[in-house]
Image: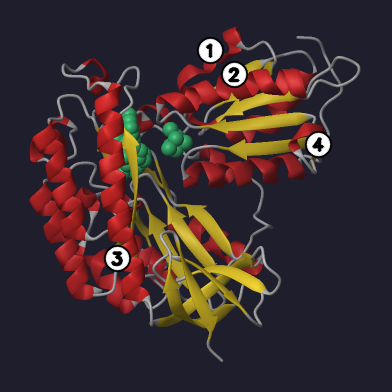
Amino acid sequence: MQSTPPPKTFHVRSFGCQMNVYDGERMAELLIADGMAQADERANAELIVLNTCHIRERAVDRVYSDIGRIGKEFARKDGSAPMIAVAGCVAQAEGDEIMARAPTVGVVVGPQAYHRLPAMVAAAAAGRRGTDTDMPEIAKFAALPRRRRSGPTAFLTVQEGCDKFCTYCVVPYTRGAEISRPFKDLVDEAQLLVEAGAREITLLGQNVNAWTGQDEASRPVGLEGLAKSLAKLPELKRIRYTTSHPTDMTDALIAAHAEIPKLMPFLHLPVQSGSDRVLKAMNRSHTVHSYLALLDRFRVTCPDIAISGDFIVGFPGETEAEFEETLTLIDAVGYAQAFSFKYSPRPGTPAATMDGQIDPAVMDDRLQRLQAAVNRGQMAFNLASVGRTCEVLVERSGKLPGQWLGKSPWLQSVHFFGDAAIGEIVSVELVEAGANSMAGRLVA
Ligand code: SAH
Ligand code: SF4
Ligand code: F3S
């Protein structure tokens, strides 16, 4: 690679989960602290960071096509093109292959090493392309700049990695072993986010409810203890957390929903399948019964909790009858929302080489039927909220003059008109239900 002047402007695009969104924000902060500026649009950036996701097949294809497109479309008159840095989980899993296949990529940096991004960009500008996919324990966070920017809602990664090894999933390989960030670091970061304008913080982790630490009084606590401490920040109005694993759920966290008013009545608890045989083959370590029993315990403590989930259709060997068990589960739970995916074989995972890989046409059909069931549940949940008056955190202005968009406590998107401002919590009566949003009326 030839040496070029170091880039002065950048653009970060994040794919995948919310933890990647968080990482993308931290990379932007790092580059700004290093003297670079955010480009007004991607086409004008001298450095483009692709913060990638490896969870499903198409995600990887998209990275390669994006790399190709950047080279073609963003080429300058003098023939030069922006420098590309590939970060995130594809970088971790396929770093060497990317370096070999894509000569326009100057930097490949994994999710645990991105604190080194500015140094690697400088080296690439000097003609030295580089890959860093090391997984030093938590060194990254200590090396990141202080947080200074936030919208009304902010993400805060509290736990990283995964030890669960579901047989279909790449996360344990791309993100490494489960680690919890220290309590004090998290309270400090939350404080800075709140000072920068955050009114809601979503605590993030691949298994966020596995977070453990020691509180101010050196007592061992779980996520409920962290939430309790964060709730003491006066300007912080709402706390959420995602994604929880059924096996890591504790009575203390369930109880916290009754004890901490700022802890929102929303639970994202992926189940993946409604068949015990498939769950076992997935190595999920819960059964349909234990999952439903857990939801029952939640509902006793927090009767209005909204439940969200993830589903995979077409796991190897899934029969029509087993798939129908998933539909039955969806109807039984009444999800407020859910994400559903066609099974995607991931290289290196046990499920990729299992017998009984499902025909794509069958997967398409199952996905459609599953999504119809989820949509029915979501619409029923939204219809049941009509007439309720609730608090809405205003996140942005709407398309129409005087219109605002925000979220209900149950994470529904709510649009309404009237006198409000971004970052305010306002009282709104939910007057009309749509499939994906609610119309509201501002209550004086
Ligand atoms: N840690 C979380 C979520 C991890 S990834 C959990 O355990 O639930 C987010 C979702 O992607 C998963 O819940 C799963 O539904 C889906 N997913 C993961 N690997 C997949 C694969 N190989 N094919 C299709 N969907 C997958
Ligand atoms: Fe993947 Fe399972 Fe870990 Fe979730 S719990 S990240 S699905 S291995
Ligand atoms: Fe994707 Fe990595 Fe998140 S694979 S879902 S970006 S942890």
Q: Is mark 3 within 8 Å of ligand 1?
A: no
> Which residue is under mark 3?
380
Q: Position of residue 341 (x, y in %)?
A: 34, 37
Whether the residues at callouts 2 and 1 have beta carbons within 8 Å, the answer is: yes
The kind of residue on which mark 4 rests is Thr
Looking at the image, residue 419 sits to the left or right of residue 76; the answer is left
Residue at the bottom extreme, as displayed? 444
| Label 4, label 1: how far apart the Cα atoms are | 26 Å
- The coloring applied to the image is secondary structure
Q: Is mark 4 within 8 Å of ligand 3?
A: no
Q: Nearer the viewer, mark 3 or mark 4?
A: 3
Residue 187, placed above or below residue 302: above
Q: Position of residue 158 (x, y in %)?
A: 44, 52
- Picture quarter with ligand 3: top left
> Which residue is under mark 2?
131
The kind of residue on which mark 2 rests is Thr
- Residue 153 quadrant: bottom right
| Label 3, label 4: how far apart the Cα atoms are | 47 Å
> Which residue is under mark 1?
96
Going from N to C along the chain, the mark reached first, 1 or 3, is 1
> Which residue is under mark 4?
9
